[in-house]
Amino acid sequence: MEIISKILIYLIFILAAPLFIGIVNKLKARSTGRIGPSIFQAYYDLRRLMRKETIYAGSASFLSRLAPVVSFVSILFAGMILPIGFTRPLISFSGDLILFAYLLGLSRFFQILGAMDIGSSFEGMGAAREATFAVFAEPIYFFTLGSLAFIFGQTSMYGIFHSITLKDPSFLVFIVVASISVFFLMITETSRMPVDDPNTHLELTMIHEVMILDNSGQDLFLYQYSAYLKILIYATFTSNFFNPFNAQNYVVGFLVYLAVMMLLIGCLVWVETMLGRFKMKSIPQYLLFAASIGILNLLIYSFFRK
Amino acid sequence: MGNVLNILFCLSLLYLATTTRVTGYLKVFVLQSILLFFIVMLPLLSHFSVFTLLLPLTILIVKAILIPGYIRKKIIYELEIKTTIESNIQQFNFLLLTVFTMVAVFVFSNLISKDAAVDPVPFAAAFSSVVTGLYVIIFRKKLIVHVIGFLVMENGIFLLGIAVASEMPFLIELGMLLDIFVVVFLMGIAINKISSTLAADEVSVLDKLKN
Amino acid sequence: MLVLFYILILPLLAGGLFFIPGNKKLKYQMSLLVSVIHLAASYMIFTGFAQPVVSQWFRIDAFSKLFLLILSHVYFWVVLNSWHFINQPDLYSPEKSRKIFFSMMNLYLFANTLALISNHLGLYWVALESTTLTVAPLIYYYRNKESLEAMWKYLFLISVGIAFAFIGILFLALSAHGTDIFEKGLFLSDLIEGSSRLNMVWLKAGFIFIFAGLSTKAGIAPMHPGEVDALSNSPSPVAALVSASLSGTALIGIFRLMQITAGTPVHQFAQVLMITGGVVSLLVALVFMFRVTNYKRMIAYSSVEHIGLIVLGAGIGGAALIGSMLHMIYNSLNKTAMFLMAGNVHRRYKSRESGDVRGVLKNMKWTGILFMTAFLAVIAMPPFGLFFSELMIFRGLVEQERFILLGVVLFVLLFIFIGMSRQTFAILYGKSERESEGIEEVNEKFNITHFTALALLVLLAAAGLFMPDTVTGVINQIAGELNR
């Protein structure tokens, strides 16, 4: 019985992904004085893409057919590890936080491979940039989550997030600070402003967009859906930091989850509207800053709390 | 609670390492001074008296209000200093260096704290502040940035004093009052004159003295 | 008690009073009077005539006596020359600087004396800061770009060094934590007495930081840039004052630390650190002596070299320690003479670059001869005292069988001699192109600077040959303090 409810929840999660991005785009438009697309626009786009013809470049190999699928599937599996709200995720075992990171990494890896497979220099450039930023973004995840794991002695995502309680008031600062770190991570991994502008198509400034430039039809459908899912996954991941209430009631838990997601959407929209794109050479430094917050937390809490 | 303040202190140091504007540096210094005020106040909350409040209040007023105000008004506005700091090494490397140093300092203070009666977290935070201030002095070119680096170093020394000799307020006051005096003297006279006799206020102009 | 008044309060009063604008000649005469009284008082303290009853805040031990005498002596000669210096034509002496000159000098004397006789490291630290503050406007005497730069660098670098020294004092306080020394308020005498009760780790850390911080002020490499820049760009009386007396004040801090660590396991470490500092200073002086083109800077590096020798000797201990204390005395005499002569050269040739200066021996007879003599003294030619003190340092090295070190030191000194003499003789002899530009062919008059230099050099030679017993007595006391 539990399994069924978990699968159900996960299905709803997957289906809600385009809605999330729809809300973000709508709010972004509103905040700059435009009316903007409807919040269901992403669904319409996906439906349109499903029906289009998939064209492959002449120089593409089997990788171009493989990459979108692998990318999509690995994100699906990564989502299964994530605790949504406070429910126990589909896949949960000790050490699964590493699996989570590397499933997402696998997805990105195949995206990069697919991009390079096409043979155009555009995609190659985007792939190189994406890979560079991924390198700097990984420490953020591991230091933040690692310090949490170290402190609570749990290595499963579900376990970690459920041990966060407000026993020690200084945890509050720790959590706020860690969530800022993870927020930076989210922005980087999902290629939002100020790391990458999802609306630009100028060759000098694209990072993520350029990798999927030559894909069409079902491939593009898979890539877009992966991107939407990724955002929702990261947003949920960030919202998990604010689950100290250990609510036992489904309804309360769900409401808390919704509230935090709304807050996150607000933050995302605010950041995207207010900040311009950073200079590309200062992005590694920006990421290192987020990582060092994690390192700092690790230092202070793990050395001195045993 | 004390830990929180120290975390924020270290965070401010990290921000110091990443920002590229002079006003950013100033903001970090003000933040640190306010944090220091709270850190000093904390153990005194139990025995409250006008006397004990005197030192923290002086610190707050001088460090968070007077000195930054002076810098902002006289030096940045009047002398129209360019807002970017000029650095000798890349920003990224500077941040990396700061992070490494912080890690080293924390490890070191953890080892040391087994030997002597120091509270390891404030000690490490203070020491990293001293070293970061030193790095700012070494690796940045503008004079006003040097002064702010010196102020940050002083904040670190003050925090060190609290962590180490909290039972000897005399020693701490000594350090602070005279350092403040030095800094005011430094800035007030030297920089004003420097900007009026030199065209640009960067240290590169000060290379005339080198062989 | 009265003696304390003479050496401490009198300069303070004078310094404060002289801020009131008034007759400069009167101020000069009063300052001269104050300095004579100071000299007399420190001499009396030195010989033991006056035994001031001290409060717990002051400490008149062998170190203080010796350093105080050196300070008074140098100060006296510098003040003697100051009237001549201040009366230079206006483009050399801006009016503003002239006004505050005497008050700053007296305040400097006060701060320095306070530092030398203080029994509390905190008080010492405050006094040291104050000396920096009082010397800075003096460095800025000429009020042009270069001196502004020199003042800024000096003030800034020294302040950073002093901040480090403060960290060291904090660590020292930490090392005394939990002992009765802490309770009583961290006085030096208690620290020295009860040094075995201190926490060794923190004592070591404190020593490192205080040594690093005070090296900035004393001019020990690698923290020497502040000192060197200040010396090369300040007016010569000020440079003489700083080089001869201020480095001594910084050194006394280091020596106090050595007093504390004596008898503890940290002492070995402290000695190693001192020896390292000394050797590095010598090496730095060697390297830069060949690269320097400014003759005042050359003298500044020579200062670094000699402080290095002093610190080296103090680190070695034994006969070398005695040698280095003697060296301190002789060095102060010598540097004052050198800087005063260099000042004369600067005034005449209007340039600090050695390339612009030629034929001093011919154009400025007295300055040339005295400069040459002072140079011979500084490279340790007998019968000048520096020869004997260096010999004692070498003897100390041999006694401890540190032959490699001895070899290195001798080698370095030789090459420093070569480098320095190259420039000095170039300055003294030769024809410069500028002669045609009309440097006044006036014959140099024998003025107060020459008298001072002559007197100092004669004293240097005499003291080298016949060292009065009182001095050796005090120095032996010093050695005793460090060899517990």
Image (cartoon, coloured by chain):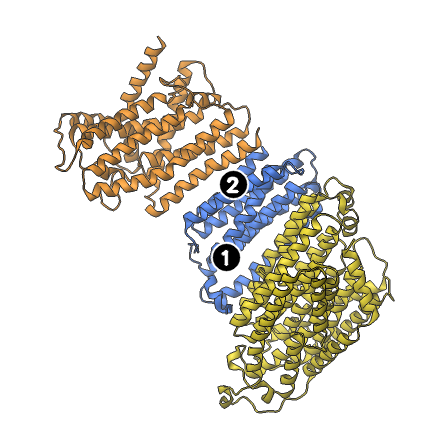
Color used for chain A? orange
Quadrant hosting residue B160: top right
| In this rendering, position of residue C294 left or right of residue C64 | left
Task: Tell me the residue that label 2 is attached to.
Answer: B103
Q: Residue furthest top?
A: A1
As rendered, which of B49 and A282 lies closer to the eye? A282
Report whether residue A87 is seen. yes
What residue lies at 71% left-to-right and 67% top-to-bottom? C328
Q: CA distance from mark 1 to mark 2?
A: 28 Å
Q: Which mark is residue C108?
A: none
- Indicate the position of residue A116 as horizontal and vertical percent values: 22, 38
Helix, strand or loop status at disc 1: helix
* Residue C460 vertical placement versus A12 (above, below): below
- The residue sitting at 71% across, 56% down in the picture is C124
Between C304 and C391, the one lying in front of the other is C391
Q: Amino acid at mark 2?
A: Val
Report if residue A195 is visible in the image.
no
In the figure, the yellow chain has which letter? C
- SS type, badge 2: helix
- Residue for point 78% across, 42% down: C180
Q: Position of residue C359 (x, y in %)?
A: 56, 86
Q: Locate the N terminus of chain C by quadrant.
A: bottom right
Residue A233: image location, x then y, percent: 34, 26
Instruction: Name the residue type under label 1.
Output: Ile
Q: State the blue chain.
A: B
1 or 2: tag closer to the N-terminus: 2
